[in-house]
Image (tube, rainbow, N blue to C red):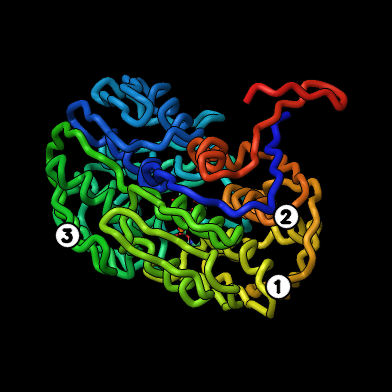
Amino acid sequence: MEKFVVTGGKPLFGEVNISGAKNAAVAIIPAVILCDEPCQIENIPNISDVALISRILQQMGANVRRINKSSLYIDPTHIKIYNAVTDLVRGMRASYYLLGALLGRFGKAKVALPGGCNFGVRPIDQHLKGFEAMGAATRLVDGAIIEAECETELQGTHIYLDVVSVGATMNIMLAASKAKGLTIIENAAKEPHIVDLANFLNSMGADIRGAGTDVIKIRGVGYLHGVTYSIIPDQIEAGTYMCAAAATRGCITVKNITPKHLESITAKLREMGVKITEYDEAIKVDASLNPLKRCNIKTMPHPGFPTDCQPQFAALLMSIPGTSIVNENVWDNRYQYVSELIRMGAHISVEGRLAIIEGGTPLTAAPVKATDLRAGAAMIIAALEIKGTTEISSIQYIERGYEDVVEKLKSLGADIKKVYFTGDNEEELRA
Ligand code: EPU
């Protein structure tokens, strides 16, 4: 069993480099299936979700080679099958992008239902509605596999999404890139990784306009050529380090980022009294100057405050005196982590979509677990606030999305290590 052991109470200082965006990478890698030539993808984060989706493509016949820590060479031309029904596929949420990519390439797809972080029901009805509107018949087989198939070829059409869905927007873009005619997605999601996927597809010769607005127009093309493409920086990883700096009342510079993607996060930190200085590709976060003030947060699709930073900000707000209210407006059940923060002395009550945080209560170290990826990030932030030593278990969730989190935090002065437990109370430290 592996754990993170964190001794907190020290402000973070220094500089940290942000990796490529997880949620762009896990869409762009399967998007290569649509390409008629090999591609090279750069600024790929070195995280377990990327390793998983790369192995899935390999299982399907693609030649996937790591050129260096952050670059992948992918030759999809030898993929002959449209089946992706393996435990690896079930192991990650983003495997649903295989549906759009395989449908776009073969006109049919058979993909195991996706797994991933568990925070309530995670339907994919809007993805399927889009594929059906384009002429594919979809069916759920044995409650575990989605089959989609069109009789001749996918046809462009109008699709109105009933909910603003990142996954459905990207999946429909994938399928539509090689469909016949024009597909229009209305009420589309606008996250930076949607623009990144569109830019990647366009660089291969696709014809996609409007990504980043709520109407996206995709005119299908017959051939996509190979490219070298660099993925955008991870706004959520950046937001997590910014939040950690504020929570420890430290001062750090977050580098290799796009400040525009972080506007909702910087706005909230400024509201709390954190001094933010923006540069072209970096942001300085200084929480060492003034006492921080409580604030309320409401998660919304982009450009609203991102749900993927909600748990981290709850961990920050529990250190600030006063009542802060968090309103989770994207997911039904993203508060499993609250019971873990309560073990550390937090006063938080959850009422439906609201978490009411009475901040500034004394906090003490306690064994806690990462209930999902961002919940795990919140545990690290909480542990960094507390003077004692906190053990965090289930860290495999954290490693799904954060590259070199131990090394990056150490470089900012944090006392954090990864510990391997090899038997009863026996520890062996290798990292
Ligand atoms: N929804 C539906 N039907 C659908 C699709 C979504 O009702 O067909 C609902 C969901 O239940 C949810 C809302 O719409 O209430 C938004 O879901 P969305 O489809 O946007 O989420 P997703 O694409 O499955 C991605 C990220 C998540 C992130 C959300 C929201 C990936 C692989 N995952 O999920 O990231 O929380 O968008 O921004 O891109 C994370 O990185 O920790 C993470 C969970």
> How far across and how far down the image is residue 55, in percent?
44, 25
Q: Residue at x 35, y 22 (%)?
A: 66
User: Which amino acid type is marked by label 1?
Assistant: Gly
Residue, disc 1: 359
Q: Are marks 1 and 3 in contact (CB under 8 Å)?
A: no
- Residue at x-position 51% and y-position 51%: 13
Q: Is residue 375 visible?
A: no
Q: Is residue 377 left or right of residue 358?
A: left
* Measured Cα–Cα span from mark 1 to mark 3: 45 Å
Please tell me which residue is depicted at 15% across the width and 43% down the height of the picture: 203
Q: Position of residue 422 (x, y in %)?
A: 77, 21
Give neighbour class at mark 2: few <14, some 14-19, many 20+ (Cα, 10 Å): many
Q: Using the image, determine if residue 224 lies above or below residue 306.
A: above
**What's the residue type where badge 3 is placed?**
Arg
Q: Nearer the viewer, residue 226 or 71?
A: 71
Q: Quadrant of residue 143?
A: top right
Query: Which mark is first along the chain, 3 or 2?
Result: 3
Q: Nearer the viewer, residue 203 or 18?
A: 18
Query: Cα distance, mark 1 to mark 2?
Result: 14 Å
Question: For the residue labelled by badge 3, is the local secondary structure a helix, a strand or a loop?
Answer: strand
Which residue is identified by label 2?
A: 386
- Tell me if mark 1 has few (under 14), some (14-19) or many (20+) residues whose alpha carbon lies within 10 angstroms of its own: many
Indicate the position of residue 298 as horizontal and vertical percent values: 53, 74
In the picture as drawn, the residue positioned furthest to the front comes out as 289
Q: Mark 2: which secondary structure? A: loop
Looking at the rendered image, the disc whose residue lies closer to the viewer, 1 or 2, is 2
For label 3, count other residues whose C-alpha is less than 10 Å away and answer few (under 14), some (14-19) or many (20+): some
Label 3 belongs to which residue? 209
